[in-house]
Amino acid sequence: MRLSQFHLRTTKETPADAELASHKLMLRAGMIRKLASGLYSWSPLGLRVLRKVEAIVREEMNRAGAVELLLPTIQPRELWEETGRWEKFGGQLLKITDRKEQHYCYSPTAEEAITDFARQELSSYKQLPVNFYQIQTKFRDEIRPRFGVMRAREFLMKDAYSFHLDDASLVAEYENMKAAYTRIFTRLGLEFRAVQADSGAIGGDASQEFHVIADSGEDALAFSTASDYAANVEAAIAADPAPRPAASQAMHKVATPTQKTCDAVAELLGITLQQTVKSVAAVTAAGQFVLALVRGDHEVNDIKLGKLEGMADYRLANEAEIVAHLGAQPGFLGPVAPQQAIRVIADRDAAALADFVVGANENGFHLAGVNWGRDLPEPEVADIRNVVAGDRARDGGELKLARGIEVGHVFQLGRQYAQALKATVLDENGKAQVMAMGCYGIGVSRIVAAAIEQNHDEAGIIWPESMAPWQVVVCMINPKNDPAVTAAAQDLVTELQAKGLDVALDDRGLRPGSMFADIELIGIPHRVVVSERGLAAGTFEYRSRRASEAENLDREQLLARLG
Amino acid sequence: MRLSQFHLRTTKETPADAELASHKLMLRAGMIRKLASGLYSWSPLGLRVLRKVEAIVREEMNRAGAVELLLPTIQPRELWEETGRWEKFGGQLLKITDRKEQHYCYSPTAEEAITDFARQELSSYKQLPVNFYQIQTKFRDEIRPRFGVMRAREFLMKDAYSFHLDDASLVAEYENMKAAYTRIFTRLGLEFRAVQADSGAIGGDASQEFHVIADSGEDALAFSTASDYAANVEAAIAADPAPRPAASQAMHKVATPTQKTCDAVAELLGITLQQTVKSVAAVTAAGQFVLALVRGDHEVNDIKLGKLEGMADYRLANEAEIVAHLGAQPGFLGPVAPQQAIRVIADRDAAALADFVVGANENGFHLAGVNWGRDLPEPEVADIRNVVAGDRARDGGELKLARGIEVGHVFQLGRQYAQALKATVLDENGKAQVMAMGCYGIGVSRIVAAAIEQNHDEAGIIWPESMAPWQVVVCMINPKNDPAVTAAAQDLVTELQAKGLDVALDDRGLRPGSMFADIELIGIPHRVVVSERGLAAGTFEYRSRRASEAENLDREQLLARLG
């Protein structure tokens, strides 16, 4: 590939409306162009990267035994009504009316279409299990499209759907896909984590997300230093706390006239935040008043609390309810001697405290030296808090927090779609059985942006080798149009290509500064300069994108370096 | 590839709603499944073929120097309004309203989007010429989607757009694309013709269509036996007729009381249809009465007639106008002695007649022995007829007629889109110039159907080698599960793959009859059978899809045959 024959168009300007580094750099490198809100054209340069990601995804899906097909982007309303999603999917579903006043949508995902395909194609257990996938354009009508292709409306997605006679087969394929995803993101050269999304209804972890680690990621993740345990902060679980120490203080009331937060109380009393307990008043769907307690340095996790018995759809209590049950106003609440009998749920760490401080249920006062079982009944204990950095993990490691960009999701769907669409096969006994399904998505175009978020510097993008538009660019410096330089550069390109490398020749005739800036901006891993001076010395100037300095290498050294 | 791991699902039933052979066979082979009117899912088998076509198109476009990019399928109304096509494109344009009440369309073609891209990316003549292409899903809201993927609403198209400073560069790239298309259809193994669509406004033939020849094709084509001349029947031009013979008869009136057609008159008089002249009365947009004359065995070509000076938007005359100008009713009209002065246009072949027969402008009578220049003035002469099979071509060959399926189109667009969207570059003198454009389309998914129309028999599809899902299928007949048969079959597959062939192993365990029927139906070019009996004899059974009989070949013969 000669760059003079390739349409390359970089700019120095940082686009005004771009916030994320990846968005800015993709525009500056000329990888994408905005056509309209959330709609991007992929330039030749951008498409090269997109296709490299696509190819790796395809190879690994094939290797994992999945079979590729292609579903229409436009899908009929009737099908989406069979699963109820025509209404339930919400505003992201782009609805379309054709010239005959028939209704369609632009597929944002394809459970309906693939299950329709499967109910026509699959009739016997002998055809199972099977995993169909496609790499196809999707559309989600985001309210606020932003961050370039990171959250575009039209995007490229790999979506796979597996069909099974029984749950065991589904779980096996789910594990197979997790392994395939791990190979995909490893081959892409990205730092990533497989993250528990939510505990599962079918078997084991029924859903995992794959995140590319990047400071700008939208999701907060927790992972252990001792194993591959990783979870969304909302779902992460820390180890049980150390056993509760013995009580050493008598309970006593302290005046805290203006101290309504644990921070303020701790400061007033000269104790650590970890000795205080925060009380959150809630009301269940059945109308029961509940006090949820976490240590002063912790936060209640709504999802965990909501999963406890009777707590589904709980809400925070209003002031009238609080006063009626506790006799005090927010800021001075606690579990000791409420006005009325209440349910008290303590987080494991709050339950493990001795001599702690809580609100006194009396405006302007807290209680100190409080101890469970002595000053108040032992509470109901549960994990109801968000993990924090430094928590001990259940595997003995330490929990670290990081931010991630979700680029993949594997999910045990179960039978909801197959049931709704009556997708059955005959089992060994000739009986119709609703198939179990899994689904497995990868955001192909989002990976391109996520990779840049993880890998860039002031000069531009730093592509992992497997995603780079070219692994090597040979830059030709030849102001005198010396045929020897041209020939040497072309020879080198040919030789490197013969080694299986994806190589371009920069023969655009730019001055070295502009040429090098372009090559750095577009993130080429390896730059080699062929010049008259170098040829005279028998050397090529080589620079790795991640190195701070260039080196002069002879041919043999260069080839060894690029091996 | 093991077919037991591949989702293959053929059916014996011929689908009720399918008319064309390709539609029937694609459904029976399980290549496609209908999702809704004009919307088809491509099964794994179908997608293999589609991807093979796509790959050949891509390779040849790249070889021709075009650069691939990817434009969004959803495009904003504002852009389409800049060229006026938001309204002008008509009902095929699928219009979409998003959640913010903004208007978009699903791209049926991408002149607007690519010109928008170009006006942002291209600023200097130094960047020209450039040819951008994409292989992307398109949508046209056909009133009557039919024939499966032949005329689907959602389809896969390769569309390329070139940009130029001047017309000469456009013409050169147009020729380059014509050559690339010829390579593409040649590599696809299809019988095809490049056909003049219409004469051009810019340079040479400003538009050509590429047609796959097939009896079921929608378009009637004429082509010469002596050169690569080919044209739509409407646009085809025959050679000039032989010079007019000398007059040998006197003009005389003959009674033709009920003979209102040339056929009837010729039968009554015992002459050939070629001695009669048909008169078609027309009125121009300016209100002038015109008599267009063609030989009795020919038909007036509206397009050719409409291109003559003053004839744009002409209409057929009504009876009152005819009677007023000629004094007779239709069936007895002619150019001799009209009531009022009229314009007479004679087709070249009608003008080359001597002693011919025309209506007498008197009800119930014709004139015979009529001669130009003697009995009436010499007419205005032009080519205003459709060619017929057997016409002499201008290159000296014979014109043959065939039917074709349009699968490609190359077009010199000129500057209309660039003008409308103000896509300019600076020329060598720093002056802004509107770019000239070419566009070049290929119906990728339609090619699959067209290939089947051209290549099939009662047993099913007959793929050209380059498009086949697999070139070779090795069928294993192994009812006793003999490991030697399995090993021999697998060895053979490996050996053939090493030769670069795309090979599948049919290890589904079907009975030979069903297995062979499937392999024929899905159109595999080469079938090899490995069986216990064959191994004992040291032979493989080989059958070409086009051969009527199988042959027993030893390994060496087989490998030579498949070389």
Image (tube, coloured by chain):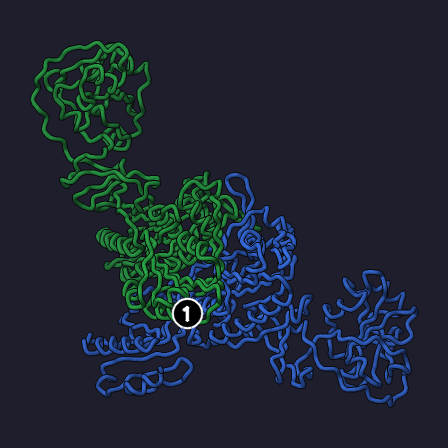
Chain colours: A blue, B green
Residue at the image point whose x is 10% and y is 13% from the top: B250
Q: Quadrant of the C terminus of chain B?
A: bottom left
Q: Amino acid at mark 1?
A: Gln
Residue B344 in the image, given as x and y percentages of width and height: 20, 22
Q: Could you say where residue B416 lies in the image, as x and y percent from the top left?
A: 32, 46
Residue A310 drawn above or below residue B208:
below
Q: Nearer the viewer, residue A410 or A533?
A: A410
Q: Is residue B91 visible?
A: yes
* Relative depth, front residue between B540 and B79: B540
* Residue B63 spot, x, y in % from top left: 28, 62
Res A287 quadrant in image: bottom right
Q: Nearer the viewer, residue A196 or A417?
A: A417
How many numbered marks, from 0 up? Answer: 1
A329 left or right of B321 in image: right
Q: Is residue A135 visible?
A: no
Q: Quadrant of residue B119?
A: bottom left
Q: Is residue A384 above or below residue B562?
A: below
Classify mark 1: residues with Cα within 10 Å, few (<14), some (14-19) or many (20+).
Answer: some
Q: Is residue B486 above or below residue B104?
A: below
Foreground of the two, A395 or B72 = A395
Give the quadrant of the N terminus of chain B: bottom left
Q: Which residue was labeled with disc 1?
A: B490
Spot occupied by residue A44 in the image (x, y as percentages of width and height): 37, 63
**Residue depicted at 83% across the width and 75% down the height:** A380
Q: Chain of mark 1?
A: B
- Determine the secondary structure under disc 1: helix
